Image (cartoon, helix red, strand yellow):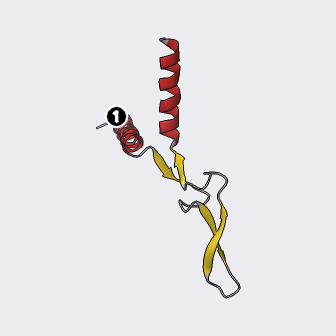
């Protein structure tokens, strides 16, 4: 196999795996709170306790993946254009 063909095949494999991930699980964990939905603080004794709600994900702990957001935007644009 030539290097160009191998590179394009690898790129196609990565793209298809990300598309299947976005189709199977459109939401991922929030990067700021790591999926908890709130910050973790410690009290004076060193025990973990719940902090403030995460403002980025609005305390859900989930965010929409970039690929799914692009798909939703393209589908909305197509739907509005063909009405």
Quick one: which residue is furthest to the right in this view? 44
Q: Position of residue 2 (x, y in %)?
A: 32, 36
Residue 29 vertical placement versus 76 (above, below): below
Quarter of the image holding residue 55? bottom right
Side of 5 relative to 28 (left or right): left
Q: Secondary structure at mark 1?
A: helix
Q: Position of residue 11 (x, y in %)?
A: 40, 39
Side of 74 relative to 2 (left or right): right
Residue 21 vertical placement versus 70 (above, below): below
Residue depicted at x 67% and y 88%: 45
Residue depicted at x 52% and y 13%: 81
- In this rendered view, identify the residue nearer to me: 40 or 8: 40
Quick one: which residue is furthest to the left in this view? 1
Quarter of the image holding residue 26? top left
- In this rendered view, identify the residue nearer to me: 6 or 62: 62
Q: Position of residue 30 (x, y in %)?
A: 56, 54
Location of the N terminus by quadrant is top left
Residue depicted at x 55% and y 63%: 36
- Label 1: how many residues lie within 10 Å, few (<14), some (14-19) or many (20+)? few
Quick one: which residue is furthest to the top in this view? 83
Residue 74 vertical placement versus 50 (above, below): above
Q: Position of residue 35 (x, y in %)?
A: 53, 59
Query: Mark 1 = which residue?
Result: 5
Side of 3 relative to 35 (left or right): left
Residue depicted at x 48% and y 51%: 28
């Amino acid at each position: 196999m030539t290097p160009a063909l191998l590179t394009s095949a690898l790129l196609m494999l990565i793209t298809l795996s990300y598309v299947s991930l976005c189709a199977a699980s459109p939401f991922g964990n929030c990067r700021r709170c790591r999926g908890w939905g709130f910050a973790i603080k410690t009290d004076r004794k060193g025990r973990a306790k719940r902090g403030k709600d995460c403002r980025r994900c609005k305390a859900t702990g989930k965010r929409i993946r970039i690929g799914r957001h692009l798909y939703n935007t393209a589908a909305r644009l197509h739907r509005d254009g063909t009405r």
